[in-house]
Amino acid sequence: MQVDAGRFLADLHKLREFGAAGVGRGVVRPAYSEADMAARDWLAQRMREAGLRVEVDPMGNLFGLADAPSLLMGSHSDSQPEGGWLDGALGVIAALEVARASREAGGPAISVVSFQDEEGRFGVTTGSAVWGGHLAQDVADLLCDHNGVTLGEARSVVPATGDVDPVQFTGFIEMHIEQGPVMDSTGEQIGVVSDIVGIRDMKITFEGQQNHAGTTPMALRQDAFQAVSTFNQALAERFANVVTPATVWTIGHVSLHPNASSIVPGKAVFSMQWRDGDADRLGRMEQIIRDLAQEVADARGMRVSFGKMLGLEPVAMDMRLRKALETSAKTVAPNKWRVMPSGALHDATNVSRLMPVAMLFVPSINGISHAFEEDTDEADLVAGLKVLAGAVAAL
Ligand code: HGY
Ligand code: MN
Ligand code: MN
Ligand code: MN
């Protein structure tokens, strides 16, 4: 099978035009936005031109289907509120090119997918979580974004054609950028993923008393922002004996009410997310988070409440698919590949409930992702495409 690097790169750049924004090659293409839906229309057209049958499921997951049984490949084409051009898009376009090339060469049947809301506007990888049976549609529909829009409302724009039965697929391979600094610092070109971390994510709310910022003495305030700040500071100390250097946690979104310079904020809602490869550790961290938040609230005479906790367990990649990627990497990038875990989440986690899965990484320049500056050398993008094609041909 002969992949066409020029056609692959041209499609990748074309996809970036939907929601192109910011510096460098940034995109703003959150799930179900106009840019996202227009990108999916274009992708569906490219799938048809590649001889694939297009189906869109009720969540908006977009499939380009080959005759069954087939190997499924792809990723997601939605972006973070400020995202890069490769996160997700690379895996979708690489899959499209391999499916096309395989068809032209009379090779194995390859289907392509772009999952919806991988970036978690409404939770954690919600499109593949629903398709994979991890999250029920009626539960998912009640999830809210940071503006109070529900997933059920947002997905009313989906031109659904029907459900896609996973039994037709023999396995799933997802290509992605590393999104971290490891390969950029070693000069390697290919990462074959061993496993994907687990995650927990929930909203926490502190409620105190909204008041005048000039007249309320410091000692008498029930300031919701001060509570968040104290909580954040103390958390690192409480975690010290539990976490490893690979454990991460993030408060990435804070909403203060009423968010005005001269008002002591009465309410703060913030996102608390933590990730680790060990499910037990994630559980111990949850207990610390809940206990500490309660302590902070009690000390100030405030209230704390916890939203629905979302999560995914750590998963290992399928050995047979992984070995096929390793063998192909040895040929395409001798001595410039490694086996590595993924600290980012991927749709592959949800798909692993349904079939064997494997993943392939290419480097991220300066290790930057979830930012407009995200990029990868063209030579590395093409090396990844070739490793993917080689593995598929061998399978
Ligand atoms: O947040 C993540 O790890 C992924 O990019 N959704
Ligand atoms: Mn991604
Ligand atoms: Mn991402
Ligand atoms: Mn006044």
Image (cartoon, rainbow, N blue to C red):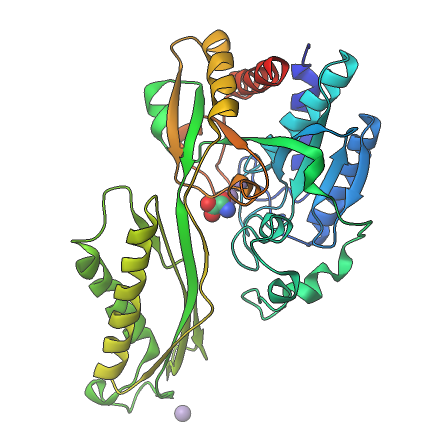
The part of the image, by quadrant, that contains residue 180 is: top left
Q: Look at the image and tell me in which quarter the N terminus lies.
A: top right
Relative side of 327 to 7, left or right: left
Q: Nearer the viewer, residue 55 or 227?
A: 55
Relative side of 7 to 216, left or right: right
**Residue 280 location in percent, x, y?**
30, 52
Location of residue 183 with respect to 238 vertically, above or below: above
Q: Look at the image and tell me in which quarter the C terminus lies.
A: top right
Location of residue 60 with respect to 287 vertically, above or below: above
Image quarter for ligand 4: bottom left
Location of residue 226 with respect to 283 vertically, above or below: below
Q: Nearer the viewer, residue 79 or 162?
A: 162
**Residue 215 location in percent, x, y?**
29, 91
The part of the image, by quadrant, that contains residue 389 is: top right
State the residue lying farthest toward the front.
167
Residue 169 seen by the camera: yes
**Disc count in the image?**
0
Relative side of 69 to 26, left or right: right
Residue 30 seen by the camera: no
Give the residue displayed 74% in from the left and 43% down from the top: 40
Q: Nearer the viewer, residue 259 or 266?
A: 266
**Residue 313 location in percent, x, y?**
43, 49
Give the residue displayed 45% in from the left and 56% down from the top: 311
**Residue 88 location in percent, x, y?**
58, 38
Give the residue displayed 61% in from the left and 62% down from the top: 140
Location of residue 211 with respect to 85 vertically, above or below: below
